[in-house]
Amino acid sequence: MPKSISVLIVGGGLGGLSAAIALRRSGHRITVLEGAKELSEIGAGIQVPPNTACILEAWGLLDKWKEKAVWPGSIIMRRYANGEIICATQLKPDMTDKYKYPYLLIHRADYIRLLYDAAVDLGVKVIVNARVQSVDEETNSVILYDRRSFQSDLVIGADGIRSKVRRAVNGDDRITPRSAGCAFRATVSAEVMRSDPETSHFMNDVNSNFWIGPERHVVGYPIKNGTLYNLVMVLPGEAATNKWNEPGDLNEMKESYNDFDPVLKKILSYVTSCRKWALAELPAIAQWVSRSGTIALIGDAAHAMLPCLAQGAAQAIEDSATLGILLSNINSLEEIPSLLRMYERIRRPRAEIIQKGSFENCNRWHLPDGVEQRARDDAMSKADASRISGTKVKGVKNPLQWSDKDFQPWLYGHNAISVAKNVLQEIIKNPSSLEERPNL
Ligand SMILES: Cc1cc2nc3c(=O)[nH]c(=O)nc-3n(C[C@H](O)[C@H](O)[C@H](O)COP(=O)(O)OP(=O)(O)OC[C@H]3O[C@@H](n4cnc5c(N)ncnc54)[C@H](O)[C@@H]3O)c2cc1C
């Protein structure tokens, strides 16, 4: 019988709860410490790509997500000034046909609730109002601000971009996230969207629409079974210092997109309240696993990225699934450090490519009007035309990464559970392979 270990997960966001599910499924005893008074998710919508859907399916949860989700037909890239379509990435049925799993859009509150319910059903203990102040690397003890303390065989830092656990993992090296602009987030009711002939088609023909322009872009898609239209509006500048999420100024929001597509401006005119959210970049960090080998980072704590590949939560869930499989066959506590290092070796290269890709995508979308922007749009349109006609056009590489013929299958066709299972099989057959770099 594999050994059951005690695990403390710091942070009950999408990453922490998915790690709780993955590790509980492997027979471990899990406590999640969440600093907030209740579990919640800021912002409205989130995209759930096939590389997440395959993990949810393996956990027996995908049907529950499908009940709450909206299934978009395509991701459509539009010119900011007039809404003209530059190119489209087919999602339905293409993603399911190519990668076996769908691409979904869901409300964050539903996402967190579904993960929470699944974790609690499995027997995970979630403690709210438990803000962690520090983690001792030598003893694996976790101290809260209210002086309560906990101790476990393994600590997972799922406490987001401003992680406290990261300090224990990286010694004194305090990594400061760099400001990378901000985002307004808002929703408009389906009723209002449908009542206007100019905006109703966004509710009927369900797609994820991106209006890309100089230094800023807007994403819009329906969520909540089509009852809300979700908007994320990225722009340069900073949200108020030390506030990561604050009430937004409606006039500032609307003025920021003054030169955008009149139809989009119409949608923005229907917004009655918004939140402003700071975006930040996390530089690549020295290590994801402590020297002691008993503390590991996942999700934004390890590899926070910009929202321009819609992969932040997806990567946190891949981290969780990988840990769950690698730690499913532990025979003694001494095995934990090498298994955690294997986790980092498997996950780090992929997550860092995606992290870098998310920054590059943002820069590419935010080009000023001019020669480079025209070349970008031209290449996107040509790559799209070649996809639709099925004819290969030599030398055309799609600057839109999630449409690119090489990047797309690498991104969406990845099954983190299968990868981790293969590595674990290799370890079981040949324990010395734990020290080797896995052939992924
Ligand atoms: C505008 C925007 C759009 C995005 N769109 C997408 C998308 O479409 N698809 C996608 O996959 N990703 C998307 N992302 C990224 C995604 O939201 C994040 O990557 C993901 O939520 C990270 O999850 P996490 O659990 O690692 O961290 P977080 O969500 O930050 O959760 C951390 C949790 O830890 C808790 N915590 C923090 N400190 C402590 C402490 N000291 N003690 C105890 N608890 C603590 C927090 O309260 C929180 O609950 C987007 C992000 C943004 C900003």
Image (cartoon, rainbow, N blue to C red):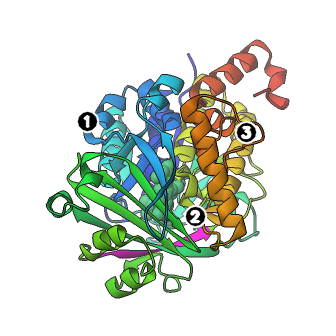
For disc 3, the neighbor class at 10 Å (few under 14, some 14 to 19, many from 20) is some
| Residue 132 spot, x, y in % from top left | 50, 64
Q: Main secondary structure of the magenta part?
A: strand
**Label 2 close to label 3 by CB (< 8 Å):** no
| Element on which disc 1 rests | helix
**Residue 71 is drawn in which quadrant?**
top left
Residue at point 54% right, 82% down? Answer: 238
Q: Amino acid at mark 3?
A: Pro
Q: Is residue 360 visible?
A: no
Q: Earlier in the sequence, mark 2 or mark 3?
A: 2
Q: Which residue is mark 1?
A: 67
Q: Is residue 264 above or below residue 109?
A: below
- Tell me the CA gap for discs 2 and 3: 24 Å
| Element on which disc 2 rests | loop
Q: Nearer the viewer, residue 134 or 118?
A: 118
- Tell me the CA gap for discs 3 and 1: 39 Å
Q: Earlier in the sequence, mark 3 or mark 1?
A: 1
Q: Amino acid at mark 2?
A: Ile
Q: Which residues are magenta?
A: 273-280
Residue at point 32% right, 65% down? Answer: 37
Q: Nearer the viewer, mark 3 or mark 1?
A: 1
User: If the image is split into quadrants, where does the N terminus sit?
Assistant: top right
Q: Which residue is mark 2?
A: 161
For disc 1, the neighbor class at 10 Å (few under 14, some 14 to 19, many from 20) is few
User: If the image is split into quadrants, where does the C terminus sit?
Assistant: top right
Residue 143 located left or right of residue 139: left
For disc 2, the neighbor class at 10 Å (few under 14, some 14 to 19, many from 20) is many
Q: Earlier in the sequence, mark 2 or mark 1?
A: 1
Q: Amino acid at mark 1?
A: Glu
| Disc 1 residue lies near ligand 1 with CB under 8 A | no
